[in-house]
Image (cartoon, rainbow, N blue to C red):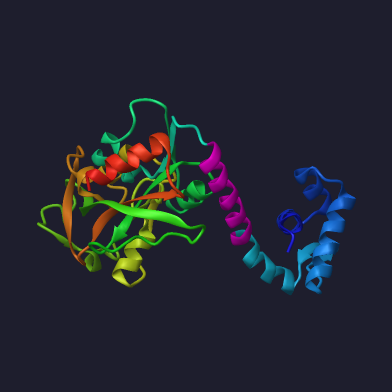
């Protein structure tokens, strides 16, 4: 399939309008119609109804493939451009807030760094498409187990750190005096849902093999201090790397003892890093 036709189809399906798609893509409406007709002829099936504009059953199936296909094409272009034309200085790093531990911070270049704080699921795509030279992703896993990443492109990953996790509770919480806590005993507790700043509740459900972990408050920011302040104020529990959870005013960090889980950080890059990116990779791996 011609990727230009496929990109036009995805845009029309997303906007549910030929005219809006033409404006976004910079084509005439007639050109957009011709693209869709050519793609339908190539596949031998109608992909869109016209009034209203909506995907047919065949069109829905094509959309399932289209996103990953177009992303892989963008990733291939970015990888080649990065290899042949990337400057030897400067570094763009995409990271989650809790992946930026002391080890990673110590390896950052002294100048020329752009730090992009992104959601965990966005970082592999940002690296694959050239929006970042390197990525730092973290998550909850069993010791020495790799994290799960979206299959967006051929990417290289390295484990760069593991540390224990703790439940952050207010000093007055009934469980604050415990020496350790089990995840199974906290299923029905009030939790903070803060996927951009802490460990997502979905990770807890997967680790415990059950539902529960209902959010009492959702925080959509990326500031870890705000998250810990919310926990200290009693708005809900949160699970954090031990180094982040320790020493929060008004709160107590109680170790999670079962199941045996760690906070794991991984470095992500595509192709062969150059310049400042290559230097950071070398320094970070030396410290592992």
**In the foreground, 200 or 69:** 69
Q: Decide if residue 161 is on the left or right side of residue 138.
A: left
Q: Position of residue 155 (x, y in %)?
A: 45, 55
Residue 272 horizontal/vertical position (percent): 43, 47
At x 55%, y 37%, the residue is 85
Range of the magenta residues? 68-85
In the picture as drawn, the residue positioned furthest to the front comes out as 84
Task: Count numbered badges in the picture.
Answer: 0
Image position of 96 (left or right of 59): left
Secondary structure mostly taken by the magenta-highlighted segment of the chain: helix
- Tell me where residue 95 sits by quadrant: top left
Residues 75 and 198: in front is 75
| Quadrant of the image occupied by residue 147 | bottom left
Q: Please state the horizontal and vertical placement of residue 256, each as a whole percent of the image.
A: 19, 59
Q: Determine whether, in the image, residue 126 is placed left or right of residue 252.
A: right
Q: Residue visible at 57% across and 52% down? A: 76
Residue 70 is covered by the magenta coloring: yes
Location of the N terminus by quadrant is bottom right
Can residue 120 be seen in the rendering of this structure?
A: yes
- Identify which residue, 170 or 35, lies in the foreground: 35
Q: Is residue 148 above or below residue 177?
A: below
Q: Is residue 282 magenta?
A: no
- What x and y, as percent, mark residue 102? 24, 38
The residue that appears at 34% across and 37% down in the rendered structure is 279
Can residue 226 be seen at all in this image of the molecule?
no
Q: Residue furthest top?
A: 111
Task: Using the image, determine if residue 141 lies above or below residue 21.
Answer: below
């Amino acid at each position: 399939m011609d990727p230009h036709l496929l990109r036009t189809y995805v845009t029309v399906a997303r906007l549910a309008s030929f005219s809006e798609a033409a404006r976004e893509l910079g084509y005439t409406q007639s050109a957009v119609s011709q693209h869709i007709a050519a793609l339908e002829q190539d596949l031998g099936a109608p992909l869109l109804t016209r009034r209203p504009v909506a995907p047919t059953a065949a069109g829905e199936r094509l959309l399932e493939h289209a996103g990953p296909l177009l992303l892989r094409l963008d990733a291939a272009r970015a990888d080649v451009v990065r290899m042949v034309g990337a400057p030897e200085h400067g570094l763009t790093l995409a990271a989650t807030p809790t992946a930026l531990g002391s080890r990673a911070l110590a390896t950052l270049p002294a100048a020329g760094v752009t730090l992009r704080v992104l959601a965990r699921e966005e970082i592999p795509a940002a690296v694959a498409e050239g929006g970042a030279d390197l990525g730092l992703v973290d998550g909850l896993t069993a010791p020495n187990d790799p994290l799960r990443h979206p299959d967006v492109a051929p990417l290289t990953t390295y484990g760069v750190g593991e540390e224990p996790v703790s439940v952050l509770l207010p000093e007055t919480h009934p469980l604050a005096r415990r020496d350790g806590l089990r995840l199974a005993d906290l299923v029905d507790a009030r939790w903070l849902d803060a996927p951009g700043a802490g460990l997502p509740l979905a990770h807890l459900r997967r680790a415990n093999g059950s539902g529960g972990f209902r959010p009492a408050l959702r925080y959509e920011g990326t500031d870890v201090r705000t998250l810990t302040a919310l926990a200290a104020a009693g708005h809900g529990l949160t699970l954090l790397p031990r180094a982040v959870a320790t020493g929060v005013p008004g709160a107590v960090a109680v170790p999670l003892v079962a199941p045996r889980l760690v906070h794991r950080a991984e470095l992500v890059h595509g192709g062969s890093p150059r310049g400042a990116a290559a230097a950071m990779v070398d320094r970070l791996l030396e410290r592992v």
